[in-house]
């Protein structure tokens, strides 16, 4: 029996990781709050159905290559077991006509020390997504006597969990930004809702983005679940679609974090970093003006890198500005092509979930 699960941050030496798979991926049909989360000018609006096989194959080729690069750097890689995602989700409270994918494991699985928590996601189409990871978590449970296999309270996702007609298509960008600044989001406080990718882990401190996919009740749940950790709600007023923190605020090593210059952390929330000599650096501009076709995310996937240790970081191969910035910041960037996988749920950090990093629960903000 060995220790298999341990990770307290995104930068200590990575030894074991899960890399997603694009098989059977579906663009889910409309459900409450999906259109609020898809940018108005996105070509994905109104589209749904299985993703074309050719795009799935290209994404899988890049995911397989990422797994290979990780193995070459001494990281053990596990892969989920995709479901047939083109099936309805039916519960006593709702029915929706399809599921989605198991490509962004980071959205679903949150590793805190020796615990992995499956998140209570707010998308109805993602209700069963965690099942793709259950064979792996079952194996970790059998092999690691300290592994805590957890599930956050399952949401019911009735209509009460969403504000209806919250955004119509005519809402201006300024109004959207005003709502982000006022912390007025489409999900309600009816029940605990969060995506794991809204949680930035820095040892004793969790910085959790309050936005379209994570609510205040989730912060309260974290406070009660982890009385020994400090929970900070963070909010980036420049982001009209605040979903997941890892294209906004990305730590590279102790004391250094890159921040999306269009989504700066407000002064009040910067204080804790400044008081502890952390440097917050504006991330380099993305190399692309638009995301790839049928992609949910913005061009800022450029900064969604995967840190292997305090020196080495995997960066998307075409993101030359970000590669150059890593070099200037004293990191060793490892370019890996990944844009064909973006549409399936994100870039290099999104596409992975930590199983084991060396190191323990440090206090970076004493
Ligand atoms: N919602 C973010 C992606 C986070 C990985 C963005 O589109 O920039």
Image: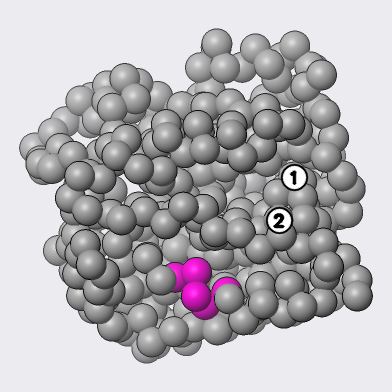
Quarter of the picture holding the C terminus: top right
Observer-nearest of 286 and 269: 269
Q: Which residues are magenta?
A: 129-133
Residue 282 appearing in the image: no
Q: Earlier in the sequence, mark 2 or mark 1?
A: 1
Tell me which residue sits at (39%, 27%) in the image. Answer: 238
Q: Residue 356 appears at what percent x and percent y?
A: 80, 61
Tell me which residue sits at (28%, 27%) in the image. Answer: 184
Tell me which residue sits at (52%, 38%) in the image. Answer: 221
Q: Is residue 108 magenta?
A: no
Tell me which residue sits at (47%, 38%) in the image. Answer: 218
**Is residue 213 shown above or below 306?**
above
Q: Residue 316 appears at what percent x and percent y?
A: 61, 59
**Is residue 275 shown above or below 321?**
above
Discs 2/1, front: 2
SS at mark 1 in the image? loop
How many discs appear? 2
Observer-nearest of 50 and 227: 227
Q: Which residue is mark 2?
A: 115
Q: Residue 157 appears at what percent x and percent y?
A: 28, 54
With 49 as the anchor, is 143 left or right in this view? right
With 121 as the anchor, is 138 left or right in this view? right
Res. 9 mark: 1
């Amino acid at each position: 029996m060995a220790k298999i699960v341990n990770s307290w941050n995104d930068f200590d030496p990575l030894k074991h990781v899960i890399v997603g798979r694009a098989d059977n991926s579906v663009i889910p049909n409309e459900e409450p709050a999906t259109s609020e989360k898809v940018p108005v000018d996105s070509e994905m609006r109104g589209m749904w159905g299985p993703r074309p096989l050719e795009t799935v194959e290209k994404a899988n080729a890049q995911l397989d290559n990422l797994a290979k690069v990780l193995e070459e750097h001494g990281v053990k890689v596990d892969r989920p077991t995709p479901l047939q995602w083109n099936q309805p989700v039916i519960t006593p409270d709702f029915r929706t006509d399809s599921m989605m994918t198991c490509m962004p494991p980071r959205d679903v699985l949150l590793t805190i020390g020796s615990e992995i928590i499956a998140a209570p996601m707010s998308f109805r189409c993602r209700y069963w997504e965690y099942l793709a990871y259950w064979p792996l978590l079952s194996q970790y449970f059998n092999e690691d006597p300290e592994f805590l296999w957890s599930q956050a309270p399952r949401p019911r996702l009735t209509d009460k969990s969403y504000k209806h007609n919250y955004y119509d298509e005519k809402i201006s960008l300024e109004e959207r930004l005003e709502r982000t600044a006022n912390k007025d989001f489409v999900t309600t406080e009816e029940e605990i809702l969060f995506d794991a990718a809204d949680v930035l882990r820095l040892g004793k401190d969790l910085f959790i983005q309050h936005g379209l996919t994570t609510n205040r009740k989730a912060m309260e749940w974290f406070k009660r679940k982890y009385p020994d950790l400090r929970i900070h709600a963070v909010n980036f007023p420049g982001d009209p679609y605040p979903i997941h923190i890892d294209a906004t605020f990305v730590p590279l090593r102790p004391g250094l974090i890159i921040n999306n210059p269009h989504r700066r952390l407000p002064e009040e929330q910067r204080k804790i970093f400044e008081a502890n000599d952390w440097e917050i650096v504006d991330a380099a501009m993305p190399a692309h003006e638009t995301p790839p076709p049928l992609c949910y995310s913005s061009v800022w996937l450029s900064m969604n890198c995967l840190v292997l240790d305090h020196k080495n970081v995997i960066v998307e191969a075409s993101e030359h500005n970000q590669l150059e910035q890593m070099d200037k910041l004293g990191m060793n960037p490892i370019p890996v092509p990944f844009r064909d996988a973006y549409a399936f749920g994100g870039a290099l950090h999104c596409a992975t979930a930590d199983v084991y990093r060396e190191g323990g629960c440090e206090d970076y903000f004493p």
